[in-house]
Image (cartoon, rainbow, N blue to C red):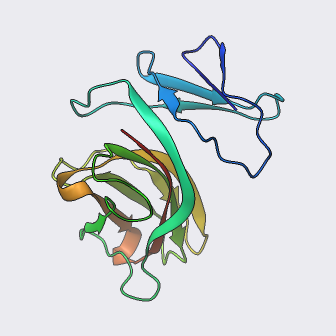
Amino acid sequence: PWASDGTWARRLGDLAPDALPSSPVRFTPVGNRVFFGAHDGTAGVELWSFPQSALAGPLDFYTVTPCRLADTRPAAPLLPNQPRTFPVSGLCGIPPEAKAVAVNLTVIAPSGPGTLIAWPTGAPQPATSSLTYATGITRTNNGTVELGTGGQIQVHGQTAANGQVHFALDVVGYFR
């Protein structure tokens, strides 16, 4: 993998497909963009961020073994107009000093179309969605979510017609 300020100049090393880097990746935004890509040219991702906080940067990124932080299927699904708080800090190898986490957000069996929004606990709910979904279709998206009050995040699933959606949250890394 590569990490870059847009010049594609800093190589992180050759890794086996299932290997995790042992050293942190420097997270250095250029304006509101950070670029990641694969050295073989078969994949590239442009990651956009729109800072809403006063996070001091740059931050270092640390990978963790992918770990499920939350899954609503054994309990109650997400309901409209009822944001739910999920603890993150101290779980799945995320240290208390982590400032943000890299996550996979998954909606499962939505009863109608809708949007999922994830944001730091204690901050105002953003107007943009983290994931948009259709009726009955399981979808996933990845993203970076800043940790809020008590190392937690909030998630809101807004499904049409007062519907409901189950949700899973997996963490793959953190920034500090």
Quarter of the image where one finds residue 70: bottom left
Given residues 19 and 39, the one toward you in this image is 19
Position above or below: 45 against 131? above
Residue 58, visible in the rendered structure? yes
Q: Which quarter of the rendering shows the N terminus?
A: top right
Quarter of the image where one finds residue 38: top right
x, y (%) of residue 138?
Answer: 60, 69
Given residues 70 and 99, the one toward you in this image is 99
Looking at the image, which residue is at 46% across and 71% down? Answer: 167
In the image, is 36 to the left or to the right of 25?
right
Looking at the image, which residue is at 57% across and 60% down? Answer: 66
Quarter of the image where one finds residue 39: top right
Position above or below: 3 against 134? above
Looking at the image, which residue is at 36% across and 75% down? Answer: 78
Given residues 49 and 138, the one toward you in this image is 49
x, y (%) of residue 56?
Answer: 26, 26
Q: How many circles with numbers are drawn on the protein?
A: 0
x, y (%) of residue 45?
Answer: 64, 33
x, y (%) of residue 176?
Answer: 36, 38
Looking at the image, which residue is at 69% across and 30% down? Answer: 37
Residue furthest front in the image: 22
In the image, is 65 to the left or to the right of 13?
left
In the image, is 76 to the left or to the right of 143?
left
Given residues 143 and 19, the one toward you in this image is 19
Position above or below: 6 against 154? above
Residue 128, visible in the rendered structure? no
